[in-house]
Amino acid sequence: MLHLGLIGDNIAASSAPKLHRLAGRQNRIEVRYDRLVPRDEGLDFEALLAACPARGYRGLNITYPYKERAIARVSVPDALVQAMGAINTILFDPEGARGFNTDYTGFVATYRAARGARDPGTVCLVGTGGVGRAIAFALVALGAGEIRLVDQAPERAAALARDLAPVAGRTRLLCVDRVEQGAAGATGVINATPLGMVGLGGTAVPETALTGVEWAFDAVYTPVETEFLDAAARQGATTISGYELFFFQGVHAWAHFSGLPLDEAALRAALAAAE
């Protein structure tokens, strides 16, 4: 049996348990996958994470709001992931815990599946926390011409810009105060805040800011259709659902957890049938 879990807040609607159990079924492996909310466990995040190896976990997914806290508790073999300052996947080995970021690889796969070889252009990224940091590094890898960083905490956007600078190459980095300012004339707009998810309704991006945008991505995937994506579609933008990031980051996390292959098309079909 493969024992896995997800640590996060507000995760009752997460489909991660389904994805990994179905991945296990493809490979004839029983998968136990638990939702772990620190408050419900009576522990803070650090204490809960430290307890997981003794509880028999092989690996964990980490979600909002713990991705940046998690990286301080593990070794990170990839220098680029270390520079991101956030992880979403942890593997427990006899030598200790190792951290990975499949949000980064998952977003690259998501973007390529939706837009092929086209570069992202000028992108307004709203939210520079854990998933926003991974997406920003992915945008650099995808060849974005300019990334405009917007956050309610300006110091967090500035910190991400500093961390991105050594790898940014020709990508211009700007910190802006308001979403409307960042979205004006942008090719793409990304919501990397939790606003819009089940239990946290609303949108971080006013519809009026989406005029002329070519594409929009929402990191939220519960629900799949968010207020932000609906507004972007009304403005004529190509919309990319956070479900795609959920799927690809999960496939990449499975590779870390198990080292086993997946038939991605069959997994998609099984997930759809299980909804």
Image (cartoon, helix red, strand yellow):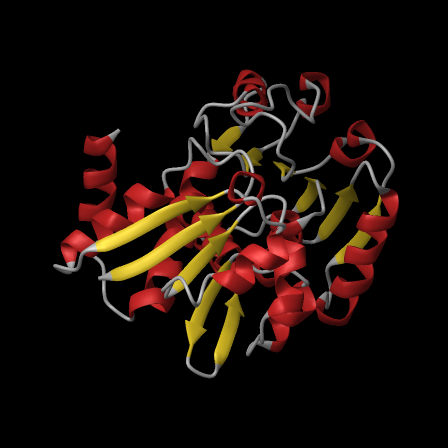
**Residue at the spot x=58%, y=33% of the render?**
214
Image quarter hosting the N terminus = bottom left
- Foreground pick, 39 / 97: 39
Answer whether residue 127 is visible to the viewer in this image.
yes
Q: Extreme left residue here? A: 28
Q: Is residue 155 above or below residue 70?
A: above
Residue 152, quarter of picture: top right
Give the x, y percent position of residue 168.
Answer: 72, 65
The relative height of residue 176 versus residue 236 in the rendered view (above or below) is below
**At 63% across and 19% down in the image, what residue appears?**
202
Of 207 and 41, which appears nearest the observer? 41
160 left or right, relative to 245:
right
Nearer to us in this view, 76 or 169: 76
The residue drawn where x is 54% and y is 27% is 197
Q: Is residue 266 above or below residue 142?
A: above
Q: In the figure, is residue 263 to the left or right of 112?
A: left
Number of on-image labels: 0
Residue 124: which quarter of the image?
A: top right
Residue at 22% over, 59% down: 262
Q: Position of residue 273 (x, y in %)?
A: 19, 32
From this viewpoint, is residue 114 visible?
no
Q: Is residue 209 above or below residue 175?
A: above
Q: Who is closer to the viewer here, 270 or 56?
A: 56
Split into 4 quadrants, where in the image is the C terminus? Answer: top left
**Outermost front residue:** 42
Residue 30 percent location from the top left of the image: 18, 56
> Percent x, y for residue 23?
23, 53
Q: Is residue 24 left or right of residue 40?
A: left
